Amino acid sequence: MRITVGTQGIGYVEARTIHNASPPDVVFVRTYDLLNIANFLQRRLFQSSSATTFANCLHCDLGFNGVDLLHLVNTISCSRTPWVVTYEHYLPRWNPRSAFGMKFLARPACKKIIAMSQFARDAQLSLLEAGSALADEIRQRLCILHPPQDPLIDSYDQKRLSNDEVTCTFVGRDFFRKGGKEILEAVARLVAEHVPVKLNIVTDLGWGDYASRATKEEAEAALSLIRSLAPHVQLHQDIPNEAVLDLFRQSHIALLPTYDDTYGFVALEAQAAGTPVLSTNVCTLPEINGAETGWLIPLPKDPYGQALLNTAEERREVSERIREGVYKILKVTIGNVADIRTKGMQALQRIREEHSPVLYTQRLLAIYREALGVTP
């Protein structure tokens, strides 16, 4: 039986968790709803709204799309059409305490709530334990399905890396939220000490994020520091995704010492290239990175796994720990290429075992069939 699944868009997360899976006998079609149309008009007439606004996080098609099933991302449906949702952190995204949103998660039309990680599942459970009368209905629909990732190399030997200089790569649009400033300062210190290190940076130097609270002046200072560190540091802007993946293939270590990250897809892409990741231990990262496959910088966290960033003092402490962590780990590791190789091989194997696109597709198809009561 062919299943027609309606989706909202072709964004990065939708592509990674839905469209790239391509289960057999499943046809994905783009759907539109009342709030989506209103949001489009707002973007055209005024300015783009936040990803966490009500209009971006509630789907209302009134059943007009004629699909068998809706598969949404970070969005709740008020439609009678059966639906499932994949989410990164919590639902409802516009307000995790919204009783109005919670009631749609408990309705019969909601068939499965797919957390992208244990971190996301735990976050949702904490909201239910806070006193929702619908907790039992919602809890039984929760499951975990980590995103798939194709290996980017067949074996570590394909990387053909230099033993004389260690190449590190940082990728992140939100440069400061993902620890870019601290990486630069750590690498500047290593370069001054004549440590053989090279750093690739792929970013547009975005600033003003919710986590680091970086300013335009800090972005200008970071750009100046990048230029002063040439040729040890190279900035890449506006390069295609395939070029980014090639940088990972040509790198010893990937850097993601982030303040906060709902998932960390960059870590999967790096590991798929046999490139071990140096990251912080916040949010989902301990689930996809560890001592066998990379390095973790411990940060002070709240009970839910997020870094403490509420005050200026807490943000300064997080920044200092990231800076020192990157510096100390790289200084020790750069002299031990064999350790990098071992971790890179383990990282590639982890991708094969835990993010298999084949197994992901099978699981997704099973979710769709269960949602519609269809037997294989």
Image (cartoon, rainbow, N blue to C red):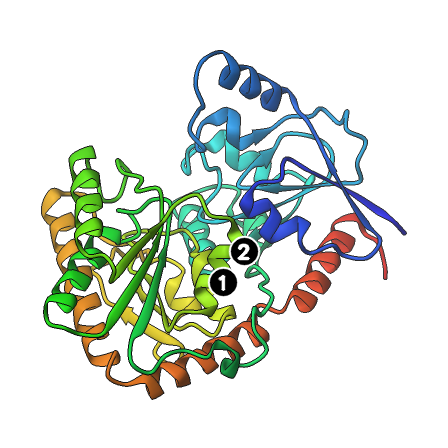
Q: Which residue is mark 1?
A: 246
Q: Position of residue 367 (x, y in %)?
A: 71, 56
Q: Look at the image and tell me whether residue 192 can be seen.
A: yes
Q: Secondary structure at mark 2?
A: helix
**Neighbourhood count class around disc 2 (C-alpha, 10 Å): few under 14, some 14–19, many 20 upward:** few
Apparent side of residue 60 relative to residue 96 in the rendered image (left or right):
right
Q: Determine whether, in the image, residue 374 is placed left or right of residue 115.
A: right
**Dot 1: few (<14), some (14–19), or many (≥20) neighbours within 10 Å?**
few
Relative to 66, is 105 on the left or the right? left
Tell me where residue 190 sits by quadrant: bottom left
Give amino acid for label 1. Asp
User: Is the C-beta separation of discs 1 and 2 under 8 Å?
Assistant: yes
User: Compared to 105, does 343 lie above or below?
Assistant: below
On the image, the x and y values in percent for residue 14 come to 60, 45
Asked if residue 162 is positioned above or below residue 287 in the image, the reply reads below
User: Quick check: 292 left or right of 65?
Assistant: left
Residue 36: % across, % down: 60, 24
Specify the farthest residue to the front: 231
55 or 78: nearer the viewer:
55
In the rendered image, which quarter is residue 214 located in? Answer: top left
Kindly identify the amino acid type of the residue bearing the numbered disc 2: Glu
Q: Nearer the viewer, residue 165 or 287?
A: 165
Estimate the spatial distance between the alpha carbons at disc 1 and disc 2, rounded to whole Å.
6 Å
318 or 165: nearer the viewer: 165
Q: Is residue 76 above or below residue 262?
A: above
Numbered circle sitting on residue 91:
none
**Coordinates of residue 297 in the picture (x, y in percent):** 25, 67
The residue shown at (90%, 52%) is 1
- Residue for badge 2: 242
